[in-house]
Image (tube, rainbow, N blue to C red):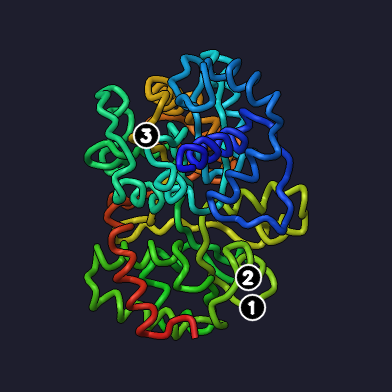
Amino acid sequence: MADINLMCQRIYCLCEMGMLPFEPLPSSVARSPVDISLAAAIVISSEFLLRDIKIRTGLLSVSGELYAQSKGEVNVYSYRQPDLIKPILDEFTAKTGIKVNFLYADKGLEERIRIEGDNSPADVLLSTDVYALENLENVGLSDEVTDKKLLARVPENMRDPDGHWLALTKRARVLYISKERVKKSDINSYLDLAAPRFKGKICMRPGSHLYNLGLFSAMNAHYGKAKTEEWLKGLRANLARKPAGNDRAQAKAVMEGLCDIALGNSYYYGLMTYNEKEPEQKKWAAAVEPVFPSGEFGTHMNISGFALVRTAPNKANALKLLEFLLSDKAQQDYADLNYEFPAVPGVKYGKKVSVLFPQKFKEDILNPIDVARGVPDALKTVNRLEFDN
């Protein structure tokens, strides 16, 4: 029975990777890994199973290794939505002939890789922030990238010291200021957010959200916990309303006159500016101007990144994908597609990012890994201060 369950779990992984067809499961079917795997196996016809698995994986029997190394494929688990990475992956396939099998999820990919164990098909984890990459390393499921040429493409503060992950793009935690009511010269650093002159003029999403916890963690690293806590008290006192909504909701609040200054990630400004599906968001973007704090340590940064899975069955192809993603053209295209900034120094901004953010700005050089490790302490402070209440 154990062998059957293992086989079924492998089959289910192939189905989700798009390498085997399957029908949607009824809502009544239990969703435990074994139940899902068995149900997925049941809906695959035995005729197809025996014929197509042999064709696609070169197996002699279904009890063999389903994830043997394939010279022409690489399996990517991704937190980046398909439409925001697929064009880049398609370019990689066109250039190298290596097929990319893509699996997207908005959570739980590290746990999935852990459960799959040595039989996981995952070669690569693509993350939209440093936290998932750090999690993968902490549970011993990432492998070191040792190629010196690849490591040299990314600054030391934008990669794991041991090569367990590397940044692909960067994003900034900026200030959305009202074009009508605030001058850029009025605010120069995050510390200014606690200034008495801005009482009742600031909006933000909950302080317990990772985007803000990352900033608070960076503040702890630069100023110490005592000064950061006093700053948080001042920031809370300056809020125009209880922290709520997402980053885009803060830009809308500025447009509506509920506040004059808001915290938001830089790429949301692009998502609003070029939003054709919800064009009303263009008005939100038009009402604000993104300010990159230059005082003290500069602008807080986060990353999207790449991690090599320790059990990768197609490790050579995974490294070829990394090499491609760190090339100048892919860096420019990938960053522009997501309204982010290239991680490789010297790469010019794409057309959209150049228009959105023409100014140069001072980046915080703190390694995102240090930010991630300081998040638990930042959360404790937020909770103790009842910041979001």
Given contact means CB atoms under 8 Å apart, are the residues at marks 1 and 2 in contact?
Answer: yes
Reading the chain from its start, which is encountered first: label 3 or label 2? 2
Residues at circles 3 and 1 in contact by the CB criterion of under 8 Å: no
Q: Which mark is residue 155?
A: none
Relative to 241, is 37 above or below?
above
**Amino acid type at mark 3:** Leu
Q: Answer with left or right where residue 280 lies relative to residue 296.
A: right
Three-letter residue code for mark 1: Leu
Helix, strand or loop under label 1: loop
The residue at which mark 1 appears reads as 258
Tell me where residue 88 appears, x and y as whole percent: 57, 28
Q: Residue at x 61, y 28 (%)?
A: 19
Q: Quadrant of residue 20?
A: top right
Who's the residue at 42% across and 47% down the image? 115
For label 2, count other residues whose C-alpha is less than 10 Å away and answer few (under 14), some (14-19) or many (20+).
many
Q: In this figure, which residue is indicated by the disc labeled 2?
A: 254
> Picture coordinates of residue 74 (x, y %)?
49, 25
Residue that carries the numbered disc 3 in the rendered image:
308
Nearest to the observer: residue 263 or residue 153: 153
Residue 388: image x %, image y %? 48, 81
Q: Label 2 is placed on what type of residue?
A: Val
Count residues near mark 1 (Cα–Cα under 10 Å), then give few for <14, some for 14-19, many for 20+: some
Under circle 2, the secondary element is helix
In the picture, measured across the screen, residue 211 lies left or right of residue 350, that is left
